[in-house]
């Protein structure tokens, strides 16, 4: 990009924005920021790194928003200035480019022939009119914008191809602008969120990672089934979610979601991030009443629901359920509310005998771990099932299509800029004594080797047309 001097825009602000020095400074800043973004973990990955820093350094990096720099206002400002600089530079350069694009050289120009070679010229024993008619046919088949001029019985032809190559650099500029705009659109209007969904349940909300605030999706996503396969070592081999997306309660799309195989619905892309398990809301209890003739009851109970004690001494409910507590396995916390006296809380374990062997003496003596804490009853946990939940990452970046369009346009622009050129060819059919002479010359804005190939090809076609060997 050249820093073209112009008298049309003497304004100091315009000169500053069109300065190539500004472009260099902005590109250096972006390079430095990219290096920092590589060295400093970004987003949720920065927690461990931040924990290893001292308070002063942590406060300094946080103030500069270096843990989330790509969404920081100062980074967006750099992008905006680079886009503005690119636009102004393009506007400055466009008039000269347009002038070259619309230029119409005279067919009878002599300057392109000043450095001609012997093979550029041959003679015919035909009239200039007849030779010119056949030359025009050949010329028009290969070139656009062919113009003809007749002066004193001599015929002059001009044609060109590839004049649009002048705009290749503008395609590259536009592609960079699209990529910059796409990044800003994604930064302002995109999000990165997560959600955990129990197998068989659905949700219409996700949680934004930065703010931890819920956000409505505008549709429901349901986990129909979750499955996980394990290696012999116990490590997860593959886990998969079958998701159904519902709009107004009606299923619209069902998809299998696997690691590295995301699913997109309504512009939101879901990734299989993790999984886990939670205890079922129902559990199986066995209650034994020891006074008098011992009796036992097997009950299916739900958390937070009140149930009467079999002897009518009060009520009980499950106030906490754990898949694994302190490495001792499944357990439930029971609250007894007697008709008289103080409430009592105690844990019951599924594998009570094994737990008794692991608990230290002080804990064994505590009523909190005594399943017979409320006499004359003894509670035991018969069964507790676990439910899997799928952990989903939900991302939306409306700037991605814009960035892809910019990438495609950049490839096109680079191809036009480096592989195409504006080739101008002249053919003069003039009277030379008793013969008719044909001369060929050409110019190009770049790629002289390509022009030479083009020129020789045209000469050969003309020689073939007139059956001249050489």
Image: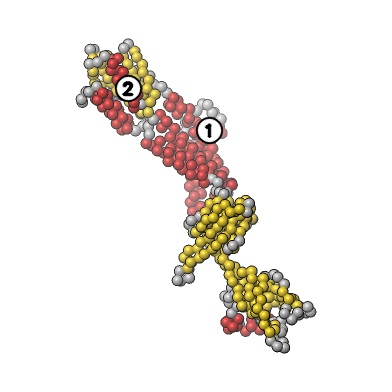
Taking the spot 61% from the left edge, 59% from the top edge, the residue there is 202
Which residue has dot 2 on it? 137
Q: Is residue 359 left or right of residue 405?
A: right
Q: Is residue 427 above or below residue 451?
A: above
* Residue lying at 52% horizontally and 37% vertically, measured from the top left: 85
Report which residue position mark 1 lands on: 15
**Rendered position, 381 above or below 239:** below
Q: Secondary structure at mark 1?
A: helix
Residue 246 image label: none
> Where residue 261 sits: x, y (%)?
48, 56
Observer-nearest of 24 and 324: 324
Residue 136: % across, % down: 32, 21
Q: Is residue 99 visible?
A: yes
Between 16 and 346, the residue placed more toward the observer is 346
How far apart marks 1 and 2 lie (CA) works out to 50 Å
Q: Which mark is in front, 1 or 2? A: 2
Residue that appears at 76% across and 80% down: 313
The quadrant holding residue 394 is: bottom right
Q: Is residue 55 visible?
A: no
Q: Secondary structure at mark 2?
A: helix
- Residue in the foreground of this view, choosing between 356 and 97: 356
Residue lying furthest right in this view? 340
Residue 286 on image: x %, y %: 65, 79
């Amino acid at each position: 990009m050249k820093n073209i001097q112009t008298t049309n825009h003497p304004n100091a602000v315009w000169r500053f924005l069109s300065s190539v020095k500004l472009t260099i400074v902005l590109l250096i800043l972006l390079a430095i920021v990219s290096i920092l973004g590589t060295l400093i973990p970004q987003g949720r990955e920065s927690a461990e790194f931040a924990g290893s820093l001292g308070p002063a350094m942590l406060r300094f990096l946080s103030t500069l928003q270096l843990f989330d720099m790509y969404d920081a206002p100062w980074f967006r400002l750099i992008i905006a200035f680079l886009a503005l600089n690119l636009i102004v530079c393009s506007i400055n350069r466009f008039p000269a480019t347009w002038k070259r694009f619309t230029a119409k050289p005279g067919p009878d120009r002599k300057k392109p022939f000043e450095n001609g070679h012997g093979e550029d010229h041959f003679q015919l024993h035909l009239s200039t009119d007849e030779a010119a008619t056949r030359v025009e046919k050949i010329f028009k088949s290969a070139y656009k914008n062919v113009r003809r001029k007749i002066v004193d019985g001599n015929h002059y032809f001009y044609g060109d191809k590839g004049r649009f190559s002048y705009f290749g650099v503008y395609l590259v500029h536009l592609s960079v602008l699209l990529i910059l705009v796409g990044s800003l659109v994604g930064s302002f209007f995109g999000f990165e969120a997560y959600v955990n969904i129990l197998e068989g349940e659905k949700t219409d909300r996700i949680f934004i990672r930065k703010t931890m605030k819920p956000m409505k999706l505008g549709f429901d996503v349901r986990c129909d089934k979750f499955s996980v396969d394990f290696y012999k070592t116990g490590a997860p081999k593959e886990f998969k979610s079958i998701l159904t997306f519902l709009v107004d309660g009606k299923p619209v799309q069902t998809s299998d979601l696997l690691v590295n195989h995301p699913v997109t619905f309504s512009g939101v892309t879901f990734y299989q991030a993790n999984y886990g398990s939670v205890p079922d809301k129902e559990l199986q209890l066995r209650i034994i009443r020891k006074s008098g003739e011992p009796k036992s009851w097997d009950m299916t109970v739900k958390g937070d629901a009140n149930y009467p004690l079999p002897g009518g001494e009060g009520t009980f409910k499950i106030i906490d359920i754990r898949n694994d507590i302190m490495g001792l396995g499944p357990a439930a916390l029971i609250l007894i509310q007697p008709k008289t006296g103080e409430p009592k809380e105690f844990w019951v374990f599924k594998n009570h005998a094994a737990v008794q062997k692991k608990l230290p003496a002080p804990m064994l003596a505590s009523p909190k771990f005594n399943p017979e804490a409320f006499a004359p009853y003894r509670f035991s946990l018969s069964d507790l099932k676990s439910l899997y939940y799928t952990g989903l990452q939900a991302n939306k970046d409306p700037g991605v299509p814009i960035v892809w369009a910019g990438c495609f346009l950049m490839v096109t622009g680079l191809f036009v800029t480096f592989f195409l050129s504006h080739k101008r060819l002249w053919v003069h059919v003039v009277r030379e004594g008793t013969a008719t002479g044909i001369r060929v010359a050409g110019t190009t804005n770049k790629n002289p080797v390509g022009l030479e190939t083009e020129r020789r090809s045209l000469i050969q076609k003309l020689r073939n047309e007139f059956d001249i060997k050489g």
